[in-house]
Amino acid sequence: MTSRFLWALLLLMLLAVLSACAPETETPVPEENAAELSETVTPEEEAAPDLDAPDSEKNFKALAEAFSVEEELAPFMTPDISIKLSNFTYGDFDGDGVHEAFAVKRIEGFGGRISVTHAALFFVRSDGCTVLELLEQTGYPYDLQHGTLDAREFFLLSDVSADYIYTVKDSRAVRLANPAQELAALVSPSERFIYGDFDGDGHNEAFAVLGNYTYFFNEESYELLRTDYFSSLPSPPSLSYPWMLDGKELIYDGANGYSVENSQAVQVFSLPYPLTRAGDSDLQFTMTIEKREAVTTKWDGSGITFDSTAKQYWLYWNGERFAEYGGRKLERKELAAFTGGLEILSSLSESGADIGNIYYRDNGIITVNYHREAETTEQGNHYNNFFRILSYSDAALTDITEEMTKDWPSRDQGAYLSSAFFDSVNTYSSIFSPIYDVQIPSRLPVEAAYDFTAAATESFLKNVSFLSTQGRLSILADGDFDGDGQNEAFALLSFNVQPDGFIRQDNFNEDCIYLFLHSGGYTILGKSLLASFSRYVLDGADLFCFAEYSDTLNLGTHVYTVTGSRAVQIAITGTELTRIGDTDQFYFSSGKNYDTASAPDGSGPGGFTYKLYWLYWDGERLVEYGGLRISEEQLGRFAYGKTVLDAIKNEGNTIDEIYYRGNGVININYGHMYKETSGKYFYSHSYKNLLYRDGSVTDIPKDWGYHPRYYNYDSEEELPSGGPGRYLDSYGNRSYPSMVDVVYPTSFP
């Protein structure tokens, strides 16, 4: 019985093997299903677009390229001009299975950088194109922006007169006339869209995230709020409301906090890392920052660094801006003066650790850096850095390292610094910090404390002595600037620069940090290439001016006053703000404007120019003299004015805009068409400056401004009488927010 059962089992196993090895045969397809299956395609085949379909992207772009807007742009065209397709965005924007596209054709000058350029925004469908808007843009033209909210696409574009916001419905382009209200009707509230009457004025506003940018909308227009993204920030941003700060409700996008006043978004703060609340307080925060200091080549944490670690630093809101609890460096004997401090030092020493830098912060946090024995490699000794976090409360120390770091990827590895924004190798972290306070403790809460509250400048240097180990700290101006009995100082932290501390031609790629020092610590005012520092003592005010320089950017002069032992920025002007004699008037250079010639296709002999603009101090603020446009006839009523106009025209030029300013300066823009050997036409831009004073028109005085010598500028100085380029009615808000008001004359004499 057993033998027969075994043979049967073996036979079944053999049949199974033979069946598995047999070739597969196709199952016959019933005749009635054959046609249906023959039309079935794979998912890959379904996903493959038909590149030659009438509504394909290729054909839509061909429609856009062929569509002519020359009739619409005819008033702005010159001989041999070309119009380029500068933006094209294609898709099924309303989800109805039909494709559409938005496109922009633009007249451009040299590199797109002339002061005015004209364009047409149009909508593309398979049956043709429709012009939506004619645009007049100043400076660098904005590109067509778009983003998705609730699966609906929105398109944004601006010019000098209006903001344009479009969406698509039933394959038609629809403009939002009341942006905030109409967006709210189309989009549900979420982390990407917040809507309401945020300032209680009866008008609604909205904040929205489109693409990777934060936008603000009111009932008439929109504003692009957040454009500078650091790798440390969430992207796209996420909106939080209400986000409480000092009892106020703000909108927070992970980097910036905004309020709304008079239906306009107001930036309350901006930080390069996301904030986390410390407990239930709406004034205390932490910020997690990643730095390369897990491994160093020197025992004290300096030298070459390897491997990044993330650690929290502590901040608080001081009523005006964020301040960091900066660390005051302690000696071991000072830590030992705390109850429990000696035991912590002994424990680390007994474990074979070498104690590094120790920092005490005014929130009661003490960080102790230490390392183990060096690891010897081909590159030399490497030290693995660690830290302990101690909390001082109720007159005793508690080790809170494990509690604090339990969710940190690198746990307790790395080294703490006195301030989150300084590191021991590169001197300043790669991010650009906005105005940002670092508050160094003035004393310790134990008997071993050293009092740093003295008002003398030397106390500042002691208080921020660690800065001197990272660069040369130079005091630029010091004294009791606001009359409160406390000294303050403006200082420069510079690296590999000239003996006077400023950037010069041979090393203009080096960075500087400019600081404001006060009895409690210091404020980082900015990081840039510094060309000069000036102090102007006016009637009732001291102005402190940091002039930045960049070989490629139009940076400006940052102007500060001092109030309540704080540096308050009151203006950003153009480059090298300079006082005219002992008057209350100033001038500055416009920085680089690429406006020597207009080249429609983006090529040609255009180049950059510097021009002067003028300001005055009205007792409370700097005000720019705006330009009132006047006619040739008005200027020609003055004998010298007519002489200059005739001379310009006799040289084959055409008079363009003429501006009259409240200080008497007259700017005459002029130019002429010319043809290059390539056969292309260009329009040159030049100007002549005059001065109206005491009932007559004369040349402008030489002491009313000069262009400083720049590193690629030919002459030692350029007098303000005339030169290449084109004047605008005002410089404010043309290149960056100037914080300077503009006042225009109401009439010409």
Image (tube, grey):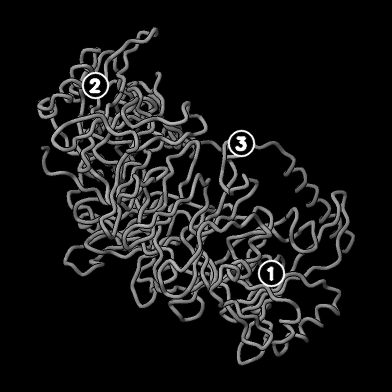
Identify the mark at residue 68; answer none if there is no mark.
2
Who is closer to the viewer here, 654 or 492?
A: 492
Dots 3, 2 in contact, CB < 8 A:
no
Image coordinates of residue 106 in percent, x first then y, are 30, 28
Q: CA distance from mark 3 to mark 2?
A: 51 Å
Q: Is residue 638 left or right of residue 452?
A: left
Q: Is residue 131 left or right of residue 338?
A: left
Task: Give the position of the N terminus as an image quadrant.
Answer: bottom right
Who is closer to the viewer here, 655 or 31?
A: 655
Task: Give the position of the C terminus as an image quadrant.
Answer: top left
Image coordinates of residue 253 in percent, x first then y, are 41, 61
Identify the mark at residue 411; answer none if there is no mark.
1
Q: Secondary structure at mark 1?
A: loop
Depth-wise, is mark 2 or mark 1 nearer the camera? 1
Image coordinates of residue 214 in percent, x first then y, are 37, 54
Q: Earlier along the polypeptide chain: callout 3 or callout 2?
A: 2
